[in-house]
C-alpha cells in the first residue's frame, strides 16, 4: 500500500492560549473539551478567487495547538504548504461581564501582549473569546443610575485594528473578533457555541485566501520568468506544488488536482522543447523498480531528488502520477485512477523500450505487471479508507479489470519468452518485442512470484489462470461481458496448449455464440477455428451435429468479414475453407434426419419480383439468383422458395441442382406446379445439401421505427388455361328447402386423370356425401364421400358442375368457402398438384319480391314487384303463380299476360307481375308457388353468348381449343371495362365490345371475328340458353269481411225524378242538392273458415269529409249489421260547393268488436278490407247559369 507524505496529511492549525490561572483551573479542561467537540468543522463554503466557483468543504480537520509551542516565524526557502503555520489564533479568558476591575488590573495587559504577538504574523487571523459564568447572588447590585460599560465592550474598544488600515478595520468590524459565550448555557446547549464556530470558519477562510493570493503571485512571477536565465523547472514545481498541498489540506481536492494537471502540462511543454537539464536520465534503473508499489510516494525521496535536480524522468512521472491518483482517490474517482494508470503504463513502457538500453530482460514487462497489480490493491485500500460510494463500484471494477488484463498480457510475453506458452494467437497478440530473446538468456526478477512462475511451468499456469480469473470476475461485475468472454478464450487456448482437449473444446465451442452479438468477428473466427482444430485432435469425437454447427458458424464469420482480419492459423484460407466444405458435405450425408440452419450468409438468394407462366402446363416459373460467398463450390441438391398469399395460401417453387453452386452468382429457374395468380409475399427460401437445410426467412417480426423493411413481393400473372373453380348459388332455388352450393370446375388445358375436391367454410357445414353431378358432364367416374368429391378421367377444356348441399346460411349475407383441389393429369402422372381457391358467395338472392293482395268479391288480385338486390342487371324470362302439384278444386289462376317477353330488372327499374285468383269454394288454404326464371345479365347471359360465339368460331376455323379460354377471358374483361354496351343490348341484343382489346399474335384474328359477330347478335325468340329458377312459396291471405262501398247519384230538384237504375242526372250544378244512395255490399267469402258465411258482424261506416268540394247531408256515420252477400243502403244528399270535375266522397268501413269473441284478453275484431266501387269515377259540376241586365249610358250625341 502506498503511504502519504507529511504535506498531504497536514491539518489546519489553530493556536489557543489563556491566562495561566485559567489554564491551570479544572474549568479549562471543560472548555478545551468543548472546543474539540466543535471539530472537525463542517459545511464550509469556499469561493475560488480565480474561477468564481463556490465549493463546499464537507469536513475540515483542525488541530488545536498551544500558542506557546509555536516557533518564531521565519521565511522557508523550501515551500511545502501554507498550512504549516496556524491560520487562526484564539485567546480565551474567563471574566464576568461586569467585572471591569479584574479586566483592567490583570487581563488587559496579558491580552495586549498576546495581541501584539499574533498581529505581527502575516496572513493569520485572531479571535478573543470571553467566557462568563453569571453569579445570581451578585446580580442587580449595581446602582440603577450608574453608567458603566461591559467587559465585552471594552474588548471591542481596546483591541481594534490600526485605524490607518481602513480595509482591515472594515473587516474587523464585520468579523466581530471579540466574542462572548455564556458558560452556564453552553454546557448544555451546543448551539451556544455555533456563532463561535461560524466565526472560526470565516477567519480560517480569510486567512487561507490571503495566504493563497500571495503564494499565487509568487507562482505567477516564477512562471513568467521561464525564458530568463537561471529559471529552474524543479524549483517551480516545488513552489506550485505547495498550492496543491495547501488545497489538499483544506480538503479542496478539485483545486489541488488542477495544480498537478497544470504542472503535467508544463512538463510536456518543457519536454517538447527538449530542455531537460533540470532532470537526470530518462531512467535510473533500480533493481526494485519492478517490485515496489507504483503509487507509493515514500518509496523514494522524490522531493529531495526534485530539489537536487537529479530526479530521473521516470521517477518524476511516477511521483506526479501518484500524487494525482491520491487526490482522485480522495474525490472517489477510482475509475479515473485506473484509466490514468493504464495509459501511463502503456505509453511509458513503450518509451522505455525505445529509448532505454541495458535493462534486464523482460524488466519492463515485470514492471508493468507488478505496477498493475499494486494499483489494483491500492484502489481496493482507498475504496475502504475513503468510504467511496458503492454506486461508483461498477466503473471502478471495469478499470481494475483492465489493469488485471494488462498484467495478464505481460504474462503472455513472459510465458512465450520462457517457453511456457506457444508463440501463436491468442498469446502472441500481446507480443511487443520486435524479435525474441536470444536462447539461453537469463531471466530473473525482484518479484519472487514471477521468478517462481518463470522457473516452474505449473506455477506459471496457476498464476496465469488466477490473474485471468480475477480480470474475468471484475469484468463480469462491471457488465463488460464481452471482455470477460475474450479472456475465457485465452483460458481455453491455455487448456488446449496444456493438453486438456475436452475442456478446451467445450470452451471454444461455447464462446462464439457470445462473441457474435458484439461483432467480435476476429475472435469469433479464431475460436471457431480452434474448436475445429481441437475436434480434429480428439479422435473419439465424431463429426456430429455439434461439429456441423461449428463449421457453419465459422463459414458465417468468414463470409461476413472476409476482407477484415481473420485469426486463422492456416496460411491458405481458401484451401482451409474448401476442405471444411467437403468435410461438411460428408458429415451431413451421414445424418439420419434433416438439420435446419436459419439465415446463413454463405449462400444468399434473390428472387425475381415477377413469375412467368409455364404456358404448356399448369404452374409458373420464377428466377432466383443464388450468390455463393465462399471461395469454393458449395454442394447443393435442391433450391426452394415459399410464397404466401391471402388467407395463408402457400406455394412452393422448387428446382433440383446437379453439381453444386459455383462461387459468385448463379441463376436458377424454379417451378411451382400449382396455378395461382396475384401478388404474393416472399416468406422463406431453402437450400438443401443432403440433410442440411439452409433456410432464410424474409418475413421478420415487425420492429417499431422507420427502419422496418418492407416485404418482398412476387407477382404471378393469371393463367386463363389453368384449372379453375367457380361457385354460385344453386340454379334451382326453393325457399324453405335445404340449400346447395353449385361448384363449377373448369379443367382448362388439363386432361384430368384423378381429381379430389374438398370444401371447407367457417360458417356452414358441407354434406359432400350428398353431392350430385348435374346432367352427364362426360365424367368417367364420380364418387362423393364425407371427406371429399372424387372425379376421374375428365377431358380438357370441359366443365363439371356439382351441387353440394350445406347447412342453413340464411342468417348470413356472404359465405366464405375454401376449396382444395388435388389433381393429377394424364400428361404428368408423377406430379400431384394441389390448388387452393378462396371464394366468397353472396348468399342473399339476386332478386327481392314484394306482394300486394286486392280482394274483389270472390276474386283475389295478386300483384308482385320484383327488384334487383345488387347493382347487377337481372334478366327474367318468365314468372308464374302455380297451384300445388295435385291442384286445388274450384281454384283458377290467370296471369295478366299470356305471352311474356324477357324483362330486364335493374337497380332503378323493377318488374311487375299481376295474377288473378278465383276461388269458388271460399278461402285457399294451400300455399301457392311463385316461380321465376331468371339469369344474371353479365355472369350468365352475356358470358354464355360470348362463350357460344367463340366456340363456334374456333370450330369453324379449326383453331386450338385452348385459345377459347383466352379469347373469352379477353372479351369479358373488355366488356367489364366499359358498360356503354348494356343499354343497346337490352333493346336489340347487340354486344358492342369496347375498343380496348390489344392485338395478340395467336388470337388476334379470333378476337376480331368474335367482336364482329357479337355486334351482329340479336335477342332470339324464343329465348335460348340456361336459366336459373327460384321458387317462392306464397300464402293466400284470409279476410273475414270484404266490403264494396259506392255512392250512386239519383236526381236533382230541377231534373225529372230518376231512380238508381236510370243512372245519375245529366247535368250537375254547383250549389244544387243532389240525391244519392250510399250502398255497402258485404261478402264473407275469404273468411278463415267455411262457416263464416253464416256470421253476422257489426260494421260502422263513415263518409269522408270533403269540405272544399262537397257538403254532405244525411247520416254520414252509422252502424249496421252485415251479412254475407247482402247490401246496406243509406240515402244521402250532396251539394257541390263549386264547379269542376272531382271525385265523390270515400266511405270508410270499420268492424266493431264481436260480442263473445276474445283474443289475447280483449274482444276480437274481425279483419275487413274495403274497396271503393266509385273510386275511379269523377263527376262534372257545372257553374250555375243566370241573367243580369245592365244599362250603360252612351253620353250625348
Image (cartoon, rainbow, N blue to C red):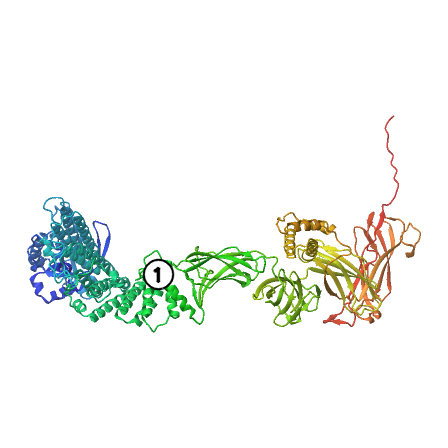
Q: Position of residue 426 (x, y in %)?
A: 27, 63
Examine the rendering and report whether any part of residue 43 can be seen: no
Q: Position of residue 453 (x, y in %)?
A: 19, 68
Name, please, the residue furthest toward the right.
1056
Taking the image as shown, residue 266 lies to the left or right of residue 639, namely left
Label 1: state its secondary structure. helix
Relative to 1159, say whether 905 is above or below: above
Taking the image as shown, residue 229 lies to the left or right of residue 932, namely left
Examine the rendering and report whether any part of residue 787 can be seen: yes
Quadrant of the rendered image containing residue 292: bottom left
The residue closer to the viewer here, 324 or 718, is 718
Relative to 994, say whether 291 is above or below: below
Taking the image as shown, residue 723 lies to the left or right of residue 847, namely left
Name, please, the residue furthest toward the bottom.
540
Quadrant of the rendered image containing residue 511: bottom left
Q: Position of residue 22 (x, y in %)?
A: 9, 63
Amino acid at each position: 500500500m502506498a503511504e502519504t507524505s507529511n504535506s498531504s496529511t497536514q491539518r489546519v492549525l489553530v493556536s489557543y492560549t489563556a491566562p495561566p490561572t485559567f489554564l491551570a483551573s479544572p474549568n479549562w479542561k471543560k472548555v478545551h473539551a468543548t472546543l474539540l467537540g466543535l471539530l472537525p468543522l463542517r459545511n464550509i463554503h469556499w469561493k475560488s478567487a480565480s474561477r468564481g466557483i463556490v465549493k463546499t468543504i464537507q469536513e475540515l480537520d483542525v488541530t488545536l495547538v498551544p500558542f506557546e509551542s509555536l516557533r518564531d516565524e521565519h521565511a522557508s526557502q523550501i515551500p511545502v504548504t501554507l498550512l504549516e503555520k496556524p491560520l487562526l489564533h484564539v485567546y480565551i479568558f474567563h471574566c464576568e461581564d461586569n467585572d471591569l476591575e479584574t479586566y483592567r488590573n490583570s487581563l488587559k495587559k496579558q491580552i495586549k501582549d498576546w495581541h501584539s504577538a499574533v498581529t505581527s504574523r502575516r496572513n493569520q487571523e485572531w479571535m478573543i473569546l470571553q467566557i462568563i459564568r453569571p453569579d445570581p447572588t451578585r446580580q442587580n447590585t449595581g446602582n440603577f443610575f450608574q453608567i458603566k460599560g461591559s467587559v465585552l465592550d471594552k474588548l471591542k474598544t481596546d483591541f481594534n485594528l490600526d485605524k490607518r488600515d481602513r480595509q482591515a478595520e472594515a473587516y474587523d468590524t464585520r468579523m466581530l473578533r471579540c466574542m462572548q459565550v455564556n458558560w452556564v448555557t453552553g454546557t448544555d446547549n451546543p448551539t451556544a457555541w455555533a456563532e463561535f464556530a461560524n466565526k472560526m470558519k470565516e477567519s480560517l477562510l480569510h486567512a487561507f485566501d490571503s495566504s493563497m493570493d500571495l503564494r499565487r503571485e509568487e507562482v505567477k512571477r516564477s512562471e513568467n520568468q521561464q525564458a530568463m536565465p537561471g529559471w529552474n523547472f524543479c524549483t517551480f514545481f516545488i513552489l506550485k506544488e505547495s498550492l496543491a498541498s495547501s488545497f489538499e489540506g483544506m480538503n479542496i481536492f478539485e483545486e489541488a488536482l488542477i495544480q498537478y494537471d497544470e504542472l503535467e502540462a508544463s512538463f510536456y511543454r518543457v519536454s517538447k522543447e527538449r530542455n531537460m537539464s533540470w532532470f537526470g536520465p530518462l531512467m535510473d534503473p533500480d533493481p526494485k523498480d519492478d517490485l515496489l508499489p507504483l503509487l507509493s510516494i515514500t518509496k523514494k525521496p522524490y522531493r529531495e531528488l526534485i530539489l537536487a535536480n537529479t530526479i530521473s524522468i521516470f521517477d518524476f512521472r511516477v511521483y506526479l502520477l501518484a500524487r494525482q491518483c491520491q487526490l482522485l482517490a480522495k474525490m472517489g474517482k477510482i475509475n479515473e485512477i485506473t484509466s490514468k494508470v493504464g495509459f501511463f503504463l502503456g505509453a511509458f513502457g513503450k518509451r522505455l523500450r525505445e529509448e532505454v538500453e541495458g535493462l534486464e530482460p523482460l524488466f519492463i514487462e515485470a514492471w508493468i505487471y507488478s505496477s498493475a497489480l499494486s494499483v489494483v490493491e491500492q484502489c481496493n485500500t482507498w475504496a475502504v479508507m475513503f468510504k467511496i460510494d458503492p454506486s461508483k463500484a461498477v466503473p471502478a471494477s471495469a478499470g481494475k479489470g483492465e489493469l488485471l488484463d494488462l498484467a495478464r498480457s505481460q504474462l503472455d510475453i513472459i510465458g512465450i519468452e520462457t517457453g511456457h506458452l506457444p508463440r501463436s494467437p491468442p498469446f502472441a497478440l500481446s507480443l511487443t518485442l520486435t524479435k525474441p530473446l536470444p536462447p539461453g538468456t537469463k531471466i530473473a526478477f525482484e518479484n519472487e512470484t514471477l521468478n517462481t512462475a518463470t522457473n516452474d511451468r505449473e506455477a506459471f499456469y496457476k498464476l496465469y489462470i488466477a490473474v485471468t480469473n480475477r480480470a474475468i470476475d471484475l469484468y463480469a461485475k462491471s457488465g463488460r461481458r464481452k471482455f470477460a468472454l475474450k479472456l475465457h478464450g485465452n483460458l481455453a487456448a491455455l487448456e488446449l496448449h496444456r493438453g486438456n482437449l475436452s475442456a478446451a473444446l467445450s470452451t471454444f465451442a461455447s464462446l462464439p455464440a457470445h462473441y457474435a452479438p458484439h461483432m467480435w468477428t476476429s475472435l469469433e473466427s479464431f475460436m471457431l477455428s480452434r474448436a475445429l482444430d481441437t475436434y480434429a485432435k480428439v479422435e473419439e469425437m465424431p463429426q456430429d451435429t455439434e461439429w456441423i454447427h461449428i463449421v457453419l458458424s465459422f463459414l458465417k464469420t468468414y463470409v461476413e468479414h472476409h476482407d477484415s482480419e481473420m485469426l486463422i492459423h492456416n496460411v491458405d484460407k481458401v484451401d482451409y475453407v474448401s476442405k471444411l466444405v467437403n468435410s461438411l458435405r460428408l458429415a451431413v450425408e451421414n445424418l439420419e434426419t434433416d438439420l435446419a440452419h436459419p439465415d446463413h450468409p454463405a449462400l444468399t438468394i434473390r428472387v425475381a419480383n415477377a413469375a412467368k407462366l409455364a404456358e404448356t402446363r399448369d404452374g409458373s416459373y420464377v428466377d432466383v439468383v443464388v450468390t455463393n460467398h465462399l471461395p469454393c463450390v458449395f454442394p447443393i441438391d435442391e433450391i426452394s422458395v415459399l410464397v404466401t398469399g391471402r388467407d395463408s395460401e402457400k406455394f412452393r417453387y422448387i428446382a433440383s441442382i446437379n453439381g453444386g453452386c459455383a462461387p459468385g452468382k448463379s441463376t436458377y429457374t424454379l417451378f411451382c406446379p400449382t396455378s395461382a395468380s396475384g401478388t404474393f409475399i416472399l416468406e422463406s427460401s431453402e437450400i438443401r445439401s443432403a440433410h442440411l437445410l439452409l433456410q432464410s426467412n424474409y418475413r421478420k417480426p415487425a420492429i417499431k421505427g422507420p427502419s422496418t423493411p418492407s416485404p418482398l413481393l412476387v407477382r404471378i400473372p393469371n393463367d386463363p388455361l389453368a384449372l379453375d373453380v367457380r361457385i354460385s348459388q344453386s340454379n334451382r332455388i326453393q325457399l324453405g328447402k335445404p340449400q346447395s352450393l353449385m361448384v363449377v370446375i373448369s379443367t382448362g388445358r388439363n386432361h384430368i386423370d384423378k381429381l379430389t375436391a374438398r370444401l371447407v367454410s367457417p360458417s356452414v357445414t358441407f354434406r359432400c356425401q350428398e353431392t350430385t353431378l348435374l346432367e352427364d358432364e362426360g365424367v368417367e367416374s364420380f364418387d362423393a364421400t364425407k371427406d371429399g368429391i372424387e372425379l376421374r378421367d375428365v377431358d380438357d377444356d370441359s366443365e363439371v358442375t356439382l351441387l353440394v348441399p350445406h347447412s342453413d346460411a340464411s342468417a348470413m349475407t356472404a359465405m366464405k368457402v375454401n376449396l382444395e383441389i388435388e389433381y393429377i393429369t394424364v400428361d404428368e402422372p408423377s406430379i400431384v398438384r394441389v390448388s387452393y381457391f378462396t371464394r366468397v358467395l353472396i348468399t342473399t338472392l339476386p332478386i327481392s319480391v314484394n306482394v300486394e293482395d286486392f280482394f274483389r268479391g270472390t276474386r283475389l288480385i295478386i300483384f308482385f314487384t320484383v327488384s334487383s338486390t345488387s347493382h347487377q342487371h337481372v334478366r327474367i324470362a318468365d314468372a308464374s303463380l302455380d297451384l300445388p302439384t295435385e291442384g286445388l278444386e274450384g281454384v283458377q289462376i290467370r296471369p295478366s299476360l299470356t305471352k311474356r317477353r324477357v324483362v330486364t330488372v335493374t337497380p332503378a327499374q323493377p318488374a311487375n307481375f299481376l295474377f288473378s285468383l278465383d276461388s269458388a269454394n271460399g278461402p285457399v288454404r294451400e300455399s301457392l308457388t311463385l316461380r321465376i326464371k331468371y339469369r344474371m345479365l353479365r355472369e350468365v347471359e352475356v358470358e354464355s353468348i360470348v362463350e357460344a360465339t367463340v366456340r363456334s368460331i374456333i370450330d369453324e376455323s379449326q383453331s386450338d381449343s385452348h385459345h377459347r379460354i383466352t379469347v373469352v377471358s379477353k372479351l369479358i374483361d373488355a366488356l367489364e371495362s366499359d358498360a356503354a354496351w348494356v343499354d343497346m343490348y337490352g333493346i336489340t341484343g347487340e354486344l358492342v365490345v369496347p375498343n380496348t382489346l390489344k392485338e395478340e399474335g395467336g388470337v388476334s384474328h379470333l378476337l376480331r371475328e368474335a367482336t364482329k359477330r357479337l355486334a351482329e347478335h340479336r335477342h332470339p325468340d324464343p329465348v335460348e340458353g340456361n336459366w336459373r329458377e327460384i321458387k317462392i312459396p306464397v300464402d293466400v291471405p284470409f279476410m273475414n269481411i270484404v266490403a264494396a262501398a259506392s255512392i250512386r247519384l239519383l236526381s236533382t230538384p230541377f231534373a225529372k225524378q230518376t231512380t238508381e237504375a236510370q243512372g245519375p242526372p245529366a247535368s250537375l250544378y254547383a250549389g244544387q242538392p243532389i240525391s244519392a244512395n250510399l250502398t255497402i255490399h258485404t261478402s264473407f267469402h275469404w273468411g278463415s273458415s267455411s262457416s263464416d258465411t253464416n256470421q253476422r258482424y257489426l260494421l260502422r261506416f263513415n263518409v269522408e269529409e270533403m269540405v272544399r268540394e262537397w257538403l254532405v247531408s244525411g247520416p254520414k256515420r252509422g252502424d249496421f249489421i252485415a251479412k254475407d252477400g247482402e247490401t246496406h243502403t243509406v240515402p244521402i244528399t250532396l251539394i257541390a260547393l263549386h264547379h269542376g270535375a272531382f271525385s265523390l266522397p270515400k266511405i270508410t268501413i270499420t268492424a266493431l268488436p264481436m260480442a263473445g269473441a276474445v283474443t289475447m284478453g280483449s274482444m276480437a275484431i274481425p279483419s275487413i278490407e274495403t274497396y271503393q266501387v266509385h273510386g275511379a269515377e269523377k263527376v262534372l259540376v257545372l257553374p250555375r247559369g243566370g241573367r243580369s241586365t245592365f244599362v250603360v249610358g252612351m253620353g250625348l250625341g
